[in-house]
Image: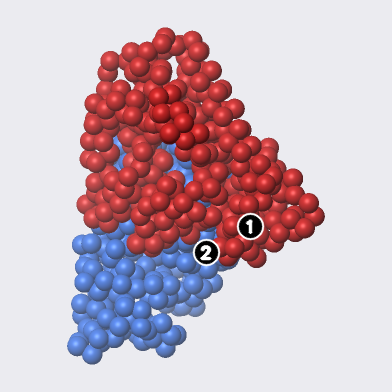
Chain colours: A blue, B red
Amino acid sequence: MTATVHPLHAKPEPSLEPLMQIVGEDMNGVNAVILERMQSKVALIPELAGHLIAGGGKRMRPMLTLACARLLGYPGTRHHKLAAAVEFIHTATLLHDDVVDGSGMRRGKRTANLIWGNPASVLVGDFLFSRAFELMVEDGSLKVLKILSSASSIIAEGEVEQLTAQRRIETDEDQYLSIIGAKTAALFAAACRVAPVVAEADEEVELALESYGRNLGIAFQLADDVIDYDSDAEVMGKGVGDDFRDGKMTLPLILAYARAGEDDRAFWRSAVSGERVSDDDLAKAISLMRSTEALADTIECARHYGRRAIDALANFPAGKAKSALAEAVEFAIARAY
Amino acid sequence: MTATVHPLHAKPEPSLEPLMQIVGEDMNGVNAVILERMQSKVALIPELAGHLIAGGGKRMRPMLTLACARLLGYPGTRHHKLAAAVEFIHTATLLHDDVVDGSGMRRGKRTANLIWGNPASVLVGDFLFSRAFELMVEDGSLKVLKILSSASSIIAEGEVEQLTAQRRIETDEDQYLSIIGAKTAALFAAACRVAPVVAEADEEVELALESYGRNLGIAFQLADDVIDYDSDAEVMGKGVGDDFRDGKMTLPLILAYARAGEDDRAFWRSAVSGERVSDDDLAKAISLMRSTEALADTIECARHYGRRAIDALANFPAGKAKSALAEAVEFAIARAY
């Protein structure tokens, strides 16, 4: 499709703009908490944390907390601290992820571990994680604490599971879904579930928004895992092909391997074991993923979870908040094509 | 003094035996929680965590929680989960410390990072840390959550401060005390303060036991920092001279440097900057620390904080719990000579 053929019917690219519009004012409150609470008398802490936090993240998770609260008509500001806590947990996991993967690029910038070293990234991650819990404790809801401490355990479990699946060609779609359900979707789910708790909504509402967040999180990670093979560094903000070179068993690779003939299977095995790290190898991997429709089917899988996320919103009243949450799902998936 | 001169008056070595006796039964409860809650469907988690947790640690911090509760006559078992949470936080920091320092030996065994690699140690540390918060949330006391989440932030802050002081010869005694007060004493203090909260004792009691824990923690770390220069690997359970080779600015080095002539100052500067890592260099460092009485004065400093810890117990009734807590202080210091 080109602009000259369908100039009037062109559907605009889905974006986070509607989400940002409905949460804009609240987000100023969250940003103030983030800025204030990442401070420390130890100068390296705000310096390192600020590099990542100020570094162009979308802040999708705290925006989801705010938008879900708006969907429920919650009038207060209690959730500002909690949304900041969610972002701190996310930032801590990014710092540790980059150490674990030895990553050099994130959000289009050099990673903290590259600039300040692994030790500083590990310890500042620990600080932000502790700070997140302090924020939750200040809020004082044991229910919120339960949701977010449980999510944190599940995230760490998912990260360890991902580590044990790395370079293991036997990893299958079920295990992949278990990993991304834990490492990514658990925090999206918790970020959304916190809002109805603060708004004192029914358990049914909690479960619906948790389901929205979980399915959105899975769709988001599926799209991310496509982008790692089908994008350029500018869009991605991090190195393309990182998953390939790290031997990460993401769905595009799992599907391509399952659909490969014997020769191509040998290629995938050697690639996953770390013997194929050149640009030509990556180009061949992408070509195989296209010819087996592994990339298209991963996007289709993302769409499936995206539809489930939108379905979870069915019983909420139509309005700006609901539309914005639905478009956030479209946005998460559209990044991949 | 030798055994043949004073055979009948020889004071027995202080030990943790009395502490273990009064908390023995409770400790079984704590160990059961630890074992149960370090489990995960991801096999690497209990494998790696178990290596360290089962690996001969003294479990001093959870024992302190239990002994303080006993001192207050607390009859319940709520503190078992909290003592386990304290040990999980401690274990998480050890895992991350060993990654940060690149350590190879801990408690007389190879470190987890050496066996399973840095990524696994970072992520399993994150898991144990999250699990600790889950245990606290299950207990349900916001006051306990506040004490332990604040301690966790302070620990991380202290670890980052230690990192920034590393290889900086200008680091002075004040900064050193700030670092160990945060990285070590904060958790001892919190472990002790949790007991009066659970036992619903007065704030005055909380502050007394916190002071006991904090001063014991400082004495403990001072003794540890002497042991790193004045012990053998068998007693130490980890490599002797690690602090020296890592350029860690601990009190023995700070004092020896302050008291050195110009030649020896040059030696210390090159050592701290990482240019002197041989066994001969370590031997020279130890010899300088002895001739300047830096080691003896660090032990004297530990005794000072030890006396403050014991003073903090003044208003508690005499009995087995109080004696055991006092002997724990003697034990912490006596390890250094």
Q: Which residue is mark 2?
A: A106
Residue B284: assigned label = 1
Task: Name above or below for residue B33 compared with residue B141.
Answer: below
Where is residue B5 drawn, in percent x and y? 46, 31
Quarter where residue B119 is shown = bottom left
Q: Mark 1 falls within which chain? A: B
Decide: is A119 above or below A153. Answer: below
Question: In the figure, is residue B210 to the left or right of B198?
Answer: right
Foreground pick, B288 / A19: B288
Dot 2 amino acid type: Arg
Residue at 38 percent of width and 75 percent of height:
A244
**In which quadrant of the rendered image does the N terminus of chain A lie?**
bottom left
* Residue placed most toward the observer, B23 or B141: B23
* Quadrant in which the C terminus of chain A appears: bottom left
Q: Secondary structure at mark 2?
A: strand
| Mark 2 vs 1: CB contact within 8 A | no
Location of residue A311 in the rendering, given as x and y in whole percent from the top left corner: 27, 50
B191, B240: nearer the viewer: B240
The structure residue drawn at horizontal position 50% and vertical position 29%, both measured from the top left corner, is B216
Spot occupied by residue B335 in the image (x, y as percentages of width and height): 47, 38
The residue depicted at 44 percent of the width and 48 percent of the height is: B236
Badge 1 amino acid? Lys
- Element at label 1: helix
